[in-house]
């Protein structure tokens, strides 16, 4: 059994593949998901599933579960918002459709979010939405106190992964260390999904996107 964790990075995407025993088989980057060559049950740190209107329940539940790290989970507006030409237009449309705006950080996901949205229906591998901060919280027993953008936060995340048998290289060309750590945490959750031991928000899933797929965040 091979499982894969995927995260966005500076050069496009980074994937970490784990063996049945949870050891790292490979870590690589590619400009597109098609070129990444993912294998097995795959988790991706990217929202999957857009609604025709309203907000996704999974995002609110994940934010609540993570406490101080909850800001790392973006609330994802309806599909129509993502067709806007720019952030100002998207924010205005989001307010019109939902009663409140969207963050500029969420808008920053647009290109990769839409790429993942196009990729999933034809993917030869099962693809699941995973949030790495939920994975790390599960590994540690509580949401982590330090940001992944701090040296201490990255060291803690690397130690948690090593404790789970996931020993990573220092860096992978084309990706930051935080992207590598996130992809590995997503792969850890993908292994839990594949073995039926993962958790899901909400449980059971309550919403389906306008593409027919369920909307849920697993870890």
Image (tube, rainbow, N blue to C red):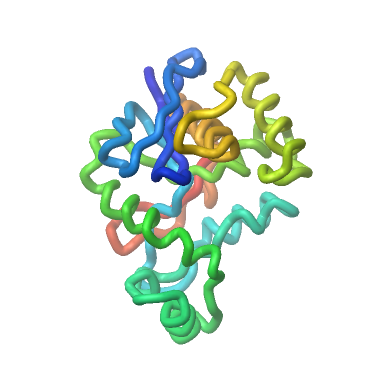
Q: Quadrant of residue 84?
A: bottom left
Q: Along the line of sight, which residue is nearer the eye, 190 or 167?
A: 167
Q: Is residue 104 left or right of residue 158?
A: left
Q: Looking at the image, which residue sits at the far top?
A: 21
Q: In this orientation, which residue lies closer to the viewer: 172 or 200?
A: 172
Considering only vertical position in the picture, is 175 above or below 217? above
Image position, residue 12 (x, y; %): 39, 45
Q: Residue placed at 68% from the left, 35% from the top? A: 154
Query: Which residue extends farthest left?
Result: 122
Residue drawn at point x = 53 percent, y = 52 percent: 202
| Residue 193 seen anywhere in this rendered image of the structure | no
Check the picture and name the quadrant holding the C terminus: top right
Question: Residue 120: x percent and y percent?
Answer: 29, 47
Q: Give the residue displayed 27% in from the left and 37% down from the top.
A: 35
Q: Quadrant of the N terminus?
A: top left
**Residue 29 image point, x, y percent:** 40, 34
| Residue most extreme to the front | 173
Residue 26 on image: x %, y %: 42, 21
Q: Is residue 202 visible?
A: yes
Q: Kindly identify the residue that appears in the image at 41 percent across and 29 percent down.
A: 28
Relative to 27, residue 75 above or below:
below
How many marks the image carries: the answer is 0
Left or right side of 34 for 47 = right
Q: In this rendered view, identify the residue nearer to me: 57 or 69.
A: 69
Based on the displayed image, in which of its 4 quarters is residue 112 positioned?
bottom left
């Amino acid at each position: 059994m091979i499982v894969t964790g995927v995260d966005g990075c500076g050069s496009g995407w980074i994937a970490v593949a784990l063996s049945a025993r949870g050891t790292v088989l490979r870590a690589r980057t590619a400009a597109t998901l098609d070129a990444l060559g993912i294998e097995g049950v795959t988790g991706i740190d990217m929202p999957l599933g857009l609604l025709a209107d309203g907000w996704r329940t999974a995002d609110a539940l994940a934010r609540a579960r993570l406490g101080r790290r909850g800001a790392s989970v973006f609330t994802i507006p309806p599909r129509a918002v993502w067709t806007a030409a720019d952030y100002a237009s998207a924010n205005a449309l989001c307010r019109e459709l939902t009663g409140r705006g969207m963050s500029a950080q969420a808008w920053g996901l647009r290109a990769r979010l839409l790429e993942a949205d196009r990729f999933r229906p034809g993917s030869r591998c099962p693809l699941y939405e995973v949030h790495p901060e939920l994975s790390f919280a599960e590994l540690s027993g509580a949401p982590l106190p330090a940001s992944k953008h701090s040296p201490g936060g990255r060291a803690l995340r690397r130690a948690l992964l090593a404790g789970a048998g996931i020993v990573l290289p220092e860096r992978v060309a084309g990706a930051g260390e935080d992207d590598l750590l996130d992809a590995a945490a997503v792969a850890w959750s993908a292994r839990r999904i594949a073995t039926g031991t993962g958790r899901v928000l909400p449980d059971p899933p309550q919403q389906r996107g306008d593409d027919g797929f369920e909307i849920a965040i697993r870890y």
